[in-house]
Image: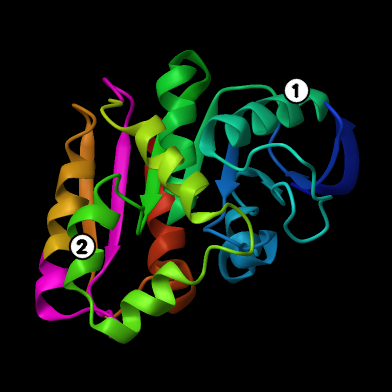
């Protein structure tokens, strides 16, 4: 099949957001990518082309990122998923969706799937943020890594908005929605203690659904889809085939 890629900006609720929609399949099923904190949709270049060979793909830049405008709206997850759902509707991208969230994007797709389960066919969490990480994991970092981590919250959400997002997703479950958690096993910024805590968080995330799998990619770091793109592409393809 030949696909058509549409990239454009649309206005909704006082903000201009940029998206790309690559439609190659005749079915309505679409894989929706949600980037990590401060990353634009180029975050997905390592896997976008290959994934779009077997699925319809939707990527976008959040408020204040990449080619999207920056608005005065809050930058927490509840506002983010409201923007995303409105954007999908405006772009006429109908459910069901397979949501793929990296890092902070994992919080957003969890919240979306919890709030709109009837629109979500499955969820893939790539090195997803966990709601307790600032309380339980960050104190286990070295002082330098703590400073770097806490100092990063100036690109998009503030630290307080980020922590508000963690509270918004706290306690949310995914029921029977198929879930795949993918974790990178090699992360040099961690101490042994913080890495052990991170792995515990990842296992907890895998328990959010009654239909879940947890894949650890040993040679990958936090940007697991960039470090080991083919393994992530294969995992997405396999999950799509089962939905």
Q: Residue at x 61, y 66 (%)?
A: 43
Q: Is residue 188 above or below residue 42?
A: below
Is residue 99 shown to the viewer in this render?
yes
The span picked out in magenta is: 174-196
Residue 179 falls within the magenta-colored stretch: yes
Q: Residues within 10 Å of mark 1 (few under 14, many from 20)?
A: few
Q: Between marks 2 and 1, how big is the CA–CA gap?
A: 37 Å
Label annotation for residue 137 = 2
Q: In this orientation, which residue lies closer to the viewer: 61 or 227?
A: 61
Q: In this orientation, which residue lies closer to the viewer: 24 or 213?
A: 213
Image quarter hosting the C terminus: top left
Q: Residue at x 48, y 25 (%)?
A: 120
Is residue 102 shown to the viewer in this render?
no
Callout 1: helix, strand or loop? helix
- Residue at mark 1: 89
Label annotation for residue 29 = none
x%, y% of residue 176? 27, 21
């Amino acid at each position: 099949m030949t696909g058509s890629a549409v990239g454009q900006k649309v206005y909704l609720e006082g903000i201009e957001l940029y998206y790309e929609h690559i439609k190659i399949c005749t079915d309505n099923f679409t894989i929706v990518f949600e980037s990590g904190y401060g990353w634009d949709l180029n975050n997905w270049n390592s896997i976008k082309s290959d994934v779009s060979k077997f699925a319809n793909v939707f990527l976008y830049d959040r408020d204040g990122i990449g080619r999207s405008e920056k608005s005065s709206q809050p930058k927490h997850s509840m506002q983010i998923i409201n923007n995303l759902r409105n954007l999908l509707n405006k772009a006429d991208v109908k459910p069901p969706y397979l949501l793929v969230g990296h890092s902070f994007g994992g919080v957003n797709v969890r919240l979306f799937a919890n709030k709109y389960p009837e629109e979500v066919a499955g969820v893939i969490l790539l090195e997803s943020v966990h709601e307790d990480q600032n309380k339980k994991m960050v104190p286990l970092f070295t002082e330098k890594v703590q400073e770097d981590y806490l100092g990063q919250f100036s690109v998009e959400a503030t630290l307080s908005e980020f922590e508000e997002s963690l509270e918004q997703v706290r306690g949310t479950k995914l029921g029977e929605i198929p879930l795949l958690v993918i974790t990178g096993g090699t992360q040099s910024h961690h101490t042994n203690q913080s890495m052990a805590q991170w792995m515990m968080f990842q296992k907890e995330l895998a328990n959010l659904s009654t239909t879940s799998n947890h894949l650890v990619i040993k040679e990958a770091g936090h940007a697991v889809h960039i470090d080991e793109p083919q393994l992530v592409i294969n995992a997405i393809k396999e999950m799509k085939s089962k939905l």
